[in-house]
């Protein structure tokens, strides 16, 4: 059966690729973007199968209206993709309050608003699949993108809770954690804090480490079929990596965490105190 998708950030990157993948197989897509001009070619190619909606996910009222418009237009919502987001570069000390709040407004609150707006429709029909686009930076953390990491960790936290809360309604939640891909994430869509000269030397080291991690970026087109298989799965996962590389990073990170927790376990237990 054809599915109806609601995709944020649909004019570029993964959002665009997944919109095309859904449309090419006959699904319908409510494709949202800050500037819908980037969706004109999809409308021309797929006609009324795609509904372009101008949307800034930071605006909660606009989000509620957009989700309602999509549901009224297509009569259903099956797959909700929270893809809108951007990368904020800067050492933690360099990030301004405005930059930190803007990062969370889009990456966390935007996804929260869309999720909350869609849930009444998904609960009413007793089905649905919410895809939260996180990152390998949502389970690990890297220098010079600390506030971005924080936003993705927050997204992962509420999404894991959400998955338990909505399971009985027949709603699935999957957190997608891509590694490095040939998208514009670190290009024109990225934002950069004013650099503090004290970090100049370390900034070079951090950039070299990032280049090493992203030395063989994935092809965004290859994610199309993967995401279709994901939304068609009978029992989709709560978390899934995209790309060849994230599992190795996660393994090293979690092995290190477990080793450190175990090494300090005597102190942890001592802090528990004795029974009264």
Image (cartoon, grey):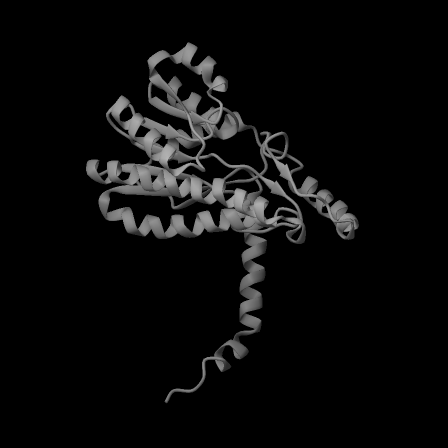
Q: Nearer the viewer, residue 231 or 195?
A: 195
Measured along the vertical axis of the image, is residue 153 above or below residue 211? below
Percent of width and height locating residue 246: 55, 44
**Image quarter of the C terminus:** bottom left
Q: Position of residue 22 (x, y in %)?
A: 38, 23
Which residue is found at the position 59% from the left and 51% from the top? 141
Q: Quadrant of the N terminus?
A: top left
Q: Where does residue 116 sit, x and y in percent of width and height?
A: 33, 42
Q: Is residue 118 left or right of residue 143?
A: left
Residue at position x 71%, y 47% in the image: 206
Q: Outermost residue toward the bottom?
A: 276
Q: Is residue 269 above or below residue 107?
A: below
Position of residue 41 measured from the top left corner of the image (x, y, whole percent): 47, 13
Closest to the observer: 214 or 38? 38
Query: What count of labels does the image hold?
Result: 0
Which residue appears at 59% of the width and 54% of the height?
252
Q: Is residue 248 visible?
A: no
Q: Is residue 128 visible?
A: yes
Left or right relative to 80: residue 107? right
Residue 272 occupies which quadrant of the picture?
Answer: bottom left
Q: Is residue 181 above or below residue 88?
A: above
Residue at position x 59%, y 37% in the image = 180
Q: Is residue 231 left or right of residue 217?
A: left
Asked whether 140 or 11 is in front, the reply is 11
**Residue furthest to the top:** 44
């Amino acid at each position: 059966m054809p599915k109806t998708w609601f995709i944020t950030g649909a004019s570029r990157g993964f959002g665009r690729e997944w919109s095309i993948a859904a449309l090419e197989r006959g699904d319908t897509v409510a494709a949202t973007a800050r500037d819908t001009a980037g969706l004109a070619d999809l409308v021309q190619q797929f006609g009324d199968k795609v509904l372009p909606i101008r949307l800034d996910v930071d605006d909660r009222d606009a989000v509620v209206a957009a989700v309602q418009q999509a549901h009224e237009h297509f009569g259903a919502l099956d797959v909700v993709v929270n893809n809108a987001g951007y990368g904020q570069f800067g050492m933690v000390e360099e990030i301004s309050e405005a930059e930190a709040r803007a990062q969370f407004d889009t990456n966390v609150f935007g996804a929260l608003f869309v999720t909350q707006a869609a849930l009444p429709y998904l609960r009413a029909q007793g089905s649905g699949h919410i895809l939260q686009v996180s990152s390998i930076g949502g389970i690990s953390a890297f220098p010079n993108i600390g506030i971005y990491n924080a936003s993705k960790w927050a997204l992962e936290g509420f999404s894991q809770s959400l998955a338990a809360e909505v399971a009985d309604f027949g709603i699935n939640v999957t957190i997608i954690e891509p590694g490095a891909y040939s998208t514009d994430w670190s290009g024109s869509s990225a934002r950069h804090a004013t650099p503090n000269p004290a970090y100049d030397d370390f900034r070079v080291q951090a950039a070299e480490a990032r280049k090493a991690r992203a030395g063989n970026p994935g092809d965004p087109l290859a994610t199309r079929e993967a995401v279709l298989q994901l939304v068609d799965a009978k029992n989709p996962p709560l978390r899934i990596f995209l790309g060849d590389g994230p599992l190795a990073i996660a393994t090293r990170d979690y092995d290190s965490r477990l080793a450190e927790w175990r090494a300090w376990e005597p102190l942890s237990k001592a802090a528990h105190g004795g029974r009264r």
